Amino acid sequence: MFVGHYSVAFAVKSERNRIPLWVLFVAVQFLDYIWATLVLLGIEKLRVIKGFTAGSMLDSYYHPYSHSLIAAFLWSTVAAIGYKPFCSWLGYPYRKSAALIVGVAVFSHWILDLVVHPRDLPIYDNTLKVGFGLWNYRDPEFALEIALLVGGIMLYVARNVLSATRKTAVIAFGVALVVVQIGDTFVPRTPLSDKATAMGVWIFYTLFVVIAFFLENARGRRKIDSP
Ligand SMILES: [Zn+2]
């Protein structure tokens, strides 16, 4: 799963929990950030093979520390526990149940990966691998990514007070994410090395985090939204 993960970030953000969208963008891809880092360090293993599945070239054959069920649960707990201190560190407001929401956002990554991955997600360590394999069916997988994203953005727009400008910016970003997904799913390309792929993950995901930050924080000449 790629842009579909962001549906959760959009969907859970509300005026009540006030969790910054950029934080949720990190949360829903937290496991992949760990994965990309561990691949760069040579600890987790990845092969990039053209046509490995219809919708993805990633043969992630060893990723117990980022993508086992137990690891996903532990990282989600770490994120949930760390969110309150993180807020006081950055001076963000902390609302009740926000820690739980951040933890759930991190864990959602594993659940969505479970739907699309071939049987390469271990329950613990590197054993008992699961995965429903929707990546074997290119078009349905693509449709799911887009449906999730659109649903998430619709919830975000409905649950948050947004100026017309900001609403347009959110929708434009959604369209850009769809274009990115079209490129990822349908445009044939030569496989990159494992390390280059992991580097690309860091770069693209962080770019999206930065955009999510500006979506909520950019100010026009007129102060249009309440902070
Ligand atoms: Zn993943």
Image (cartoon, rainbow, N blue to C red):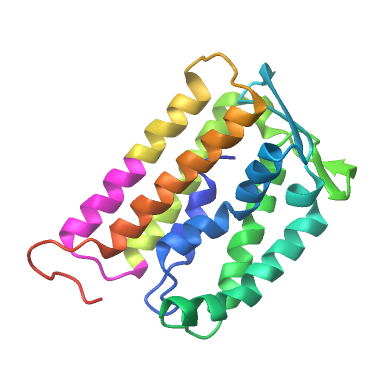
Query: Which residue appears at 30% of the width and 63% of the height?
Result: 216
| Spot occupied by residue 66 in the image (x, y as percentages of width and height) | 73, 50
Q: Main secondary structure of the magenta part?
A: helix
Q: Relative to residue 12, is residue 164 drawn left or right?
A: left
Q: Residue pushed farthest front?
A: 41
Residue 59 forms part of the magenta stretch: no
Query: Which residue appears at 63% of the width and 73% of the height?
Result: 80
Viewport quadrant of the C terminus: bottom left
Q: Does residue 87 sit above or below 42 in this rendering?
A: below
Q: Residue pushed farthest bottom?
A: 96
Residue 162 forms part of the magenta stretch: yes
| Spot occupied by residue 138 in the image (x, y as percentages of width and height) | 59, 25
Q: Does residue 104 sit above or below 39 in this rendering?
A: below
Query: Which residue appears at 66% of the width and 28% of the height?
Result: 194
Front in this rendered view, residue 121 or 161: 121
Q: Residue pushed farthest left?
A: 221
| Numbered disc total | 0
Residue 59 visible: yes
Q: What stretch is highlighted in magenta?
A: 159-175
Query: Which residue appears at 17% of the width and 59% of the height?
Result: 164
| Spot occupied by residue 51 in the image (x, y as percentages of width and height) | 66, 16
Q: Relative to residue 34, is residue 88 drawn left or right?
A: left
| Spot occupied by residue 18 in the image (x, y as percentages of width and height) | 41, 75
